[in-house]
Amino acid sequence: MAIKLVREFKQNQQLSITPQLKKSIDLLQLSRIEIINKINNEIEENPFLTKDYDNESSSTFDDMDLLNNLSNELTLQNHLKSQLDDLKLTISEKKIAQFIIQSLEENGLLKMDLDEIEELMGFTYSIKEIKSVLNHIIQNIEPAGIGARDFKETIFIQLKRKEIPSEELEIADKILFDPQFSNFKDAKDELEVHYSESTIENVLKKIKQCDLSPGLEFESTIIIQPDLEVIPQNNENFNVQFKSESFPKISLDQDLEELVKDKKNKASKELKEKMGEAKWLIRAINKRNETVQNVGTLICLKQADFLSEKSAELKPLSNLELAKELKISPSTVSRILRSKYIQTPKGALSMKSLLASSVSKTRKVTPIQLMEEIQKIIEGEQKKLSDQKISDLLNKRGFNLARRTISKYRKKINLPSSRNR
């Protein structure tokens, strides 16, 4: 068989990332502390960049050596682990507790599912054992509210720790976890039939005083600097503004730019490149800040009831939904959400913590809402209902959920199957 060389032409599409695009992507991921330090480093290295010192707050922390040399005892994880040593725990309890502590978000909440923890620990311990350690050990150490799965749970943990009267705790339980109440006003109107208005008002006041990010409360304020701030208005609305007072304002050195542009001076190629880099950095930082504000503003708009303290529950909201409305890539939204914080009347909250996934494609239902619905159905059942029957009941109300979804979330709240109930 003869071997022939044949020339073929083939057309392909290929996406290549330019160096500038890669640097732009990297800028999106930086926290406020990190980007402030990057700006300061660029000012030192690039003569074309000038800084407006009148715009810079004296409280700005831009010394990376200071951040790098912070004592390990300042971290939330080390603080929580040190408390385990004072408790009489079994070896298995301590291992589970340490794993849960390492799995906590920066705000102190546990977003990882218990079955995921079970899998990551090699199925050495059951979900029941993990849940027991979470409820009876992690959620009982300081600061109060640590280890909660959502904002409502962290509020309830803090109220229990304050040892409020049993009637008030009962009211708080109904306000926070009864699925029929979508906001505080509905809950108040309904509960006034059984409880006094003053008692309900007192409970609502205590709920609104709770810390939604107990983990951030422990961390030194040098670590967290919010990019955005929610400013309440008189008519219960609010504005979302970029915090510019502590953010370095940079511009191009006009005099140096004119010297480079003057053909008589014959500026070197290196100087022209530095000038181009300075212009690009200014544009990229402005774009980064604009995108952060757009994403943050949309999140706050979607979660307006939660932020204005009309409800303790987040509405289902995903990266994809934000990306579609803003007409940007979901990956861009994901990078923006990394280490970005919003200063709210309830304290600093991470932007990521204000998102909530939906378990249904046809109806916005968070996992917590679904678990509450499942628990309510099982508590009110006259005869034992299988997961399929529960699925059918919820689907008649437009949930569109499979039996395996019901089974998954029933197990998460530690409820046995119909055969074992």
Image (spheres, grey):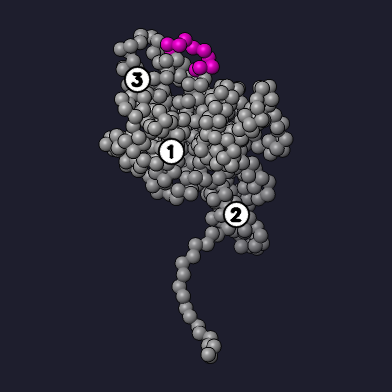
Specify whether residue 133 is in view: yes
Q: Nearer the viewer, mark 2 or mark 1?
A: 1
Counting from the top left corner in percent of width and height, residue 165 is at 47, 10
Residue picked out by circle 3 = 187
Q: Amino acid at mark 2?
A: Glu
Q: Are marks 3 and 1 in contact (CB under 8 Å)?
A: no
Q: Counting residues from the N terminus, which is met first, the one under dot 3 or under dot 1?
A: 3
Q: Look at discs 2 and 3 and give the one toward the viewer.
A: 3
Residue placed under numbered mark 1 in the picture:
408
What are the residue bounds of the magenta stretch?
Answer: 159-168
Find the residue positioned furthest to the bottom.
2
Q: Is residue 135 left or right of residue 408?
A: right
Residue denoted by label 2: 277
Residue under the image location 45 percent in, 15 percent down: 169
Which disc is residue 123 wearing? none
Left or right of 300, for residue 222: right
Q: Residue at x 34, y 29 (%)?
A: 384
Tell me the quarter of the picture where residue 385 sits: top left
- Image position, residue 68 (x, y; %): 70, 37
Say which element carries label 3: helix
